[in-house]
Amino acid sequence: MRDTVVLAYSGGLDTSVCIRWLQEKYGYDVVTVTLDLGQQDELRAIEEKAHLLGVKSHYTLDVQDEFVSGYVFPAIKFNAMYQGKYPLSTALGRPLIAKKLAEVAAKEGADAVAHGCTGKGNDQVRMEVTVKSINPELKVVAPVREWNMSRDEEIRYALAHGIPIKPSKSIYSVDQNLWGRSIESGPLEMPDQEPPAEVFEWTTLPEEAPDTPGYLEIQFTEGVPTAVDGTSMRGKELIEHVSRVAGSHGVGAIDHVEDRLVGIKSREVYECPAAVAIIEAHRDLEKLVLTRNELAFKSEVEREWAWLVYSGLWLDPLRADLDRFVEGTQDRVTGKVRLKLYKGSVRVAGRSSPCSLYDIGLSTYNGSRFDQRMAAGFIELWGLQSRTTSLTREGDRRIGHQRKTAKAAG
Ligand code: ARG
């Protein structure tokens, strides 16, 4: 009996060539898995293509709800942005893909899984580390990393092996899911050049965005968004709605130079309208309800969490540890944030919460309850060590002066 390999299949050229390659070179029976992460692909057509290429069986799995509750909602609670800019949309999807590969492998009695990631990116690391963390016995095959074919060679291979190829409509490498779109390669490889307008599909160019600002009022309940403009929505619908509205005002286009795990600096363009808007709102609400100490400590934890996710360590026990800490902070993150969207910018226009620590009776310039006489004593104590240090230095200077004069005299 032939061994079985479970391949993460997108329906594109790379992973289609992978099917044939795994059959030919390794003599594997190939089982394909395509996940619906909200990437808006033609899932039926992908399934048909897999069967045409002679797979043993094909799985189409709608994992959108699991993606939202298990991956995107935690990212919101952590205000997750790698290097301050990238909401980790692609990175968050990988451990879920890896988990499903391992599950299907168990079900099919497969001894290996395979993916179409290249050897230069982060995705191979995320997939393989996660698969091996779930089941260390599984072998992982990475054909694209092994075969080292150019695009033209791949096309020739495809033609010779009966793989249907659509005339490629894009020179870009695109990965998308509910949380965002990643666009790479082609002219984007020149970091000094503005991205061509054609790469943006989810965000309107600022110059083409409406002349009147839009508003979104996002309701959060214990750290996660639950309603928009007064209408309760399920996670997936809410994200899609915010994505459409924020994107139509040009919010969520991201262009930055990113440090990949393997050390390469790469120019990355993303469209993450929902992520940018929701995290902006969530971060703002936290400032209303969490203490100064919580906010300061949490921002360190956020950076660490984003790094674990980016670098493929989704299953490192530290992530679960950090989850428990942040979970404890989120029970007060309930309230509403009103966002103003205008020609590519998003700003907070108002916030309110039943857990608010804001007390106008203290902060007002107009007859505050705050007893200003307390400040004088506070300042004495607050500056105590700085003052003491300064006095000691003055002492040092005087002693130094005495020594010098003593030397000169002696
Ligand atoms: N640099 C991003 C990341 O590592 C995006 C990767 C996009 N992947 C792709 N196949 N185009 O998460």
Image (spheres, grey):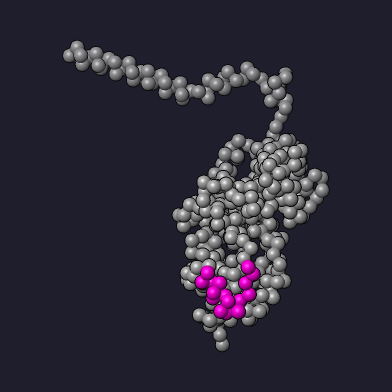
Could you say where residue 247 lies in the image, as x and y percent from the top left? 70, 48
What residue is at 63 percent from the left and 79 percent from the top? Answer: 53
Could you say where residue 90 lies in the image, as x and y percent from the top left? 60, 57
User: Which residue is at the front of the view, 150 or 82?
Assistant: 150
Placement of 279 over or under 59, stated as above or below: above
Q: Which residues are magenta?
A: 152-167
The image quarter containing residue 69 is: bottom right
What residue is at 27 percent from the left and 14 percent from the top? Answer: 402
Placement of 393 over or under 121, stated as above or below: above
| Residue 162 painted magenta | yes
Tell me if I can see residue 282 in this picture.
no
What residue is at 57 percent from the left and 22 percent from the top? Answer: 378
What residue is at 60 percent from the left and 55 percent from the top? Answer: 182
Tell me if I can see residue 12 in this picture.
yes
| Residue 359 painted magenta | no
The image quarter containing residue 110 is: bottom right
Quarter the N terminus occupies? bottom right
Horizontal side of 3 relative to 355 (left or right) equals left
**In the displayed image of the protein, which residue is found farthest to the right?**
231
Quarter the C terminus occupies? top left
Could you say where residue 338 lies in the image, as x and y percent from the top left? 74, 39
Could you say where residue 184 lies in the image, as x and y percent from the top left? 57, 56
